[in-house]
Image: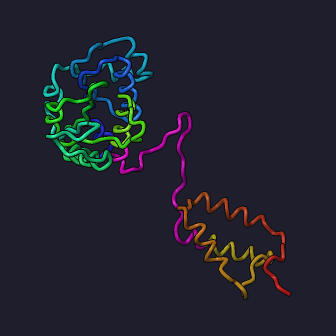
Amino acid sequence: MNPEVLLSRIRVVLCRPSHPGNIGAAARAMKTMGLSNLYLVSPKQFPDPEADTRATGAVDVLAQATVTTSLKEALAGTAFAVALSARQRDIGPVLGAPRETVARLIAEAAAGSDVALVFGNETVGLTNEEILHCQAAVTIPTNPDFSSLNLGSAVQVLCYECRMAAFLEQPPVVVPGVTPFASPVATHDEIEGLYGHLETIMTDSGFYNPEQPGRLFPKLRRLFGRVRLEKDEINILRGILASTQVKTGHGRKG
């Protein structure tokens, strides 16, 4: 399924956020990872200029945010919700690791359901009642000696995991202002042609002695086998080889 469609089915729900700047930071974190559905449960201050300032280019996410008075209302229509919690509660879902739990979240989205990531208040987190509205819970494995993680950063971590899961850990990398380009992958025959060309040039130059081959060609095959050579790369390498005619005598003995 289209990864962008999967990401469009994810809601980021902030319960009782106390600082508008954190709402803006969360919106920015969402947009950088391709998420756009922000739900705010009883925010203390929203809308607010501070939220717009901290959003830095993600004001559109704030503009279309849904404000509700309860988590139940924010989760209406979803089939799977994941709560972020710093500790295991006496009742409620068992705390899982973000990567494995987000994989379940994406699987639910792939089945056609709306899903949600649920974050608590900056100071006190989620209440037990709020966690019981969720089907799973995660904790971010921070440094135990300094576990403080602000709301925007927590949203960034889980949104990143969502993007990686949606794109099967290979999201496209786009460099602004640069048009991606690549030639087709080289065929087996083209790669073998490169090896044949290498052998001819190295033999003619004296670098390679066919009567005493050693492990030179196995090592060269291992070297080029680490990457998927493209047709253009084969052509470049063979062009370089064709221009190399200087004899070294490296592979000759006696």
- Segment colored magenta: 163-192
Mark count: 0
Q: As drawn, is 153 to the left or to the right of 224?
A: left
* Scheme of colours in the image: rainbow
Residue at position x 36%, y 31% in the image: 30
Where 55 sits versus 182, above or below? above
Q: Nearer the viewer, residue 199 or 212?
A: 212
Image spot of residue 4 (x, y percent): 33, 40
* Residue 136 occupies quadrant: top left
Q: As drawn, is 236 to the left or to the right of 94?
A: right
Where 19 sits versus 81, above or below? above
* Residue 68 occupies quadrant: top left
Q: Nearer the viewer, residue 201 or 48?
A: 48
**Majority secondary structure of the magenta segment?**
loop
Q: Nearer the viewer, residue 140 or 13?
A: 140
Residue reaching furthest to the top: 49
Where 21 sits versus 175, above or below? above
Residue reaching furthest to the right: 254
Image spot of residue 57 (x, y percent): 43, 22
Q: Nearer the viewer, residue 150 or 101?
A: 150
Q: Quadrant of the C terminus?
A: bottom right
Residue 170 belongs to magenta span: yes
Q: As drawn, is 241 to the left or to the right of 171?
A: right
Image spot of residue 211 (x, y percent): 73, 88
